[in-house]
Amino acid sequence: MGKDVIIACDFAGKAQVIEFLEKFGDRKLFVKIGMELFYAEGPEIVREIKARGHKIFLDLKLHDIPNTVKKAMAVLSHLDVDITNLHAGGTKAMMEAALEGLTREDGTRPLLIAVTQLTSTNQERMEADLLIKEPIDKVVMHYAKNAAEAGLDGVVCSPLEAGKVHDLCGEKFLTITPGVRFADGDKGDQARVMTPAEAKKIGSDYIVVGRPITAAEDPVAAYDRCVAEFVD
Ligand code: C5P
């Protein structure tokens, strides 16, 4: 899989997501399904979107003991998603177990991506709540390295970190980057943002774009603009 734009389908239910996807006619998209939609609609929503020919990044961010994550990943692998993820904070043992669970009998598996530190966690919260005293950039890079050593395919990171992650973990280690906004667009609640063109320049492999597409007056035009800036 090469560079692509993943649309964050952060909708409350099936009706809204299907209505949104139908605006694109027969076009095949890469969509991110998160906890809200998955917990509301269950695995059926994944089957339904897959059956329409779209690729799926199932963003459930698993984090539990290795055995539980392994078994949960085995279930997810049968949903035939293209990418799924977990928290690197679950340790290398958990990530290795996850990969084992995700691998199907024929040896194929979805790509597995790690979340390092959430962008909602800042230095102050990490030190006070998690008792991690190292600089947050160092923690993010350490977690990325752990993910690479455990055999994962990449990390979710800010576009600003994508270059550094590639330097540390190799060019083939994927960087999936949210926090993308058009130069003339609304930043919303994202603090550190980049345009699709900048994300391309810095080496992001996939950009995850939600509201700049889903809340646009013309979502198809907004998606096409992302593709033109990032992929073409
Ligand atoms: O609407 P917006 O483009 O901000 O959506 C970005 C998507 O990426 C959302 O689904 C959000 O939960 C997700 N995300 C993020 N920042 C992270 C990890 C995931 O914005 N660090």
Image (tube, helix red, strand yellow):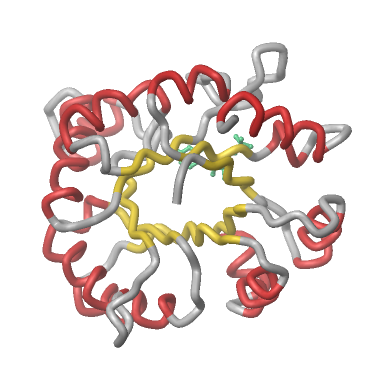
Q: Position of residue 197 (x, y in %)?
A: 55, 20
The residue lying at 58 percent from left, 45 percent from top is: 6
Q: Position of residue 79 (x, y in %)?
A: 51, 78
In this view, the residue farthest toward the top is 184
The residue lying at 44 percent from left, 19 percent from top is: 201
The residue lying at 66 percent from left, 53 percent from top is: 29
In which quadrant of the rendered image does the C terminus lie?
top right
Q: Nearer the viewer, residue 109 or 129?
A: 109
**20 relative to 205 in the view: left or right:** right
Q: Position of residue 217 (x, y in %)?
A: 88, 32
Q: Position of residue 119 (x, y in %)?
A: 40, 33
**2 relative to 46 in the view: left or right:** left
Task: Quadrant for residue 117, please give it.
Answer: top left
Q: Nearer the viewer, residue 39 or 45?
A: 45
Tag count: 0
Q: Is residue 94 above or below residue 152?
A: below
The residue lying at 25 percent from left, 69 percent from top is: 98
